[in-house]
Amino acid sequence: MPRDRFAAMACSVARTANIVADPWTLVVLRDLFLGLTRFDQFTDDLGIATNTLTDRLTTLVDAGLVERRPYRERPVRHEYHLTEAGKDLYGVVVSLLAWGDRHLAPDGAPLRLRHTTCDHETTPVVSCSHCGGELHADDVVPLPGPGGRAAPGTRVIAELLTSRRGVGRSTD
């Protein structure tokens, strides 16, 4: 399926994946979150081909997730910084980190996180915005949203969600 078809789906996962679901893009985002900003830092850290890095950074800039800022005029050089929309992907990146640590790191986590608010090491979790409880797949019921529709890529899911309309809805 061509990537532009994902962008047209009435599915936030498909639309987001259309932009970020590439291993190079995800590790570039990781490096941005860890403080790298310059092209040569990315190539040195990742060993990524310059044309591949240029393509991934252009995609992130065009999507409004990263902005280019000049730091030298001659020759012109840019730094790359996360926008607010880019920073909103932090939960996605650290969720992948936590999953990888749990399932793919037999020698232990290659990176630890310290929460600066409480000054303790932490493991990322996905939590309910209402009660704060940790979310697990078995604890959540998907319901149709206002932007959902039956279309290629979401037709069967839309029918399933429509049959659940009202199930598990909050009264407040």
Image (cartoon, rainbow, N blue to C red):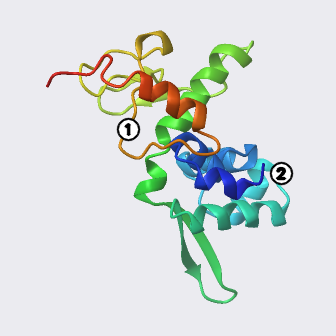
Secondary structure at numbered mark 1: loop
Q: Looking at the picture, which amino acid does disc 1 mark?
A: Gly
Q: Position of residue 57 (x, y in %)?
A: 66, 63
Extreme residue toward the bottom, this view = 74
Q: Position of residue 101 (x, y in %)?
A: 64, 20
Labels 1 & 2 near each other (Cβ < 8 A): no
Q: Is residue 87 left or right of residue 171?
A: right
In percent of the image, x 29 and y 28: which residue is there?
129
Q: For marks 1 and 2, give the one nearer the viewer.
A: 1
Distance of label 1 from label 2 (alpha carbons): 42 Å
**The image quarter in which residue 148 lies:** top left
Neighbor class of circle 2 (other Cα within 10 Å; few <14, some 14-19, many 20+) is few
Q: Which residue is mark 2?
A: 47
Expressed as whole percent of the image width and height from the top left, the position of residue 72 reads: 60, 82
Determine which of the numbered discs, if any, sits on residue 32 in the image.
none
Q: Residue 19, relative to residue 159: is it above or below?
A: below
Q: Is residue 145 left or right of residue 132?
A: right
Residue designated by label 1: 145
Q: Residue at x 59, y 60 (%)?
A: 37
- Dot 1 alpha-carbon crowd within 10 angstroms: few under 14, some 14 to 19, many 20 or more: few
Q: Secondary structure at mark 2?
A: loop
Task: Identify whether 57 is placed above or below 130.
Answer: below
Drawn side of residue 88 relative to residue 58, left or right: left
Q: Residue drawn at (48%, 20%), measured in percent from left and top? A: 123
Q: Count of labels shown?
A: 2
Can you say which quadrant of the picture contains the C terminus?
top left
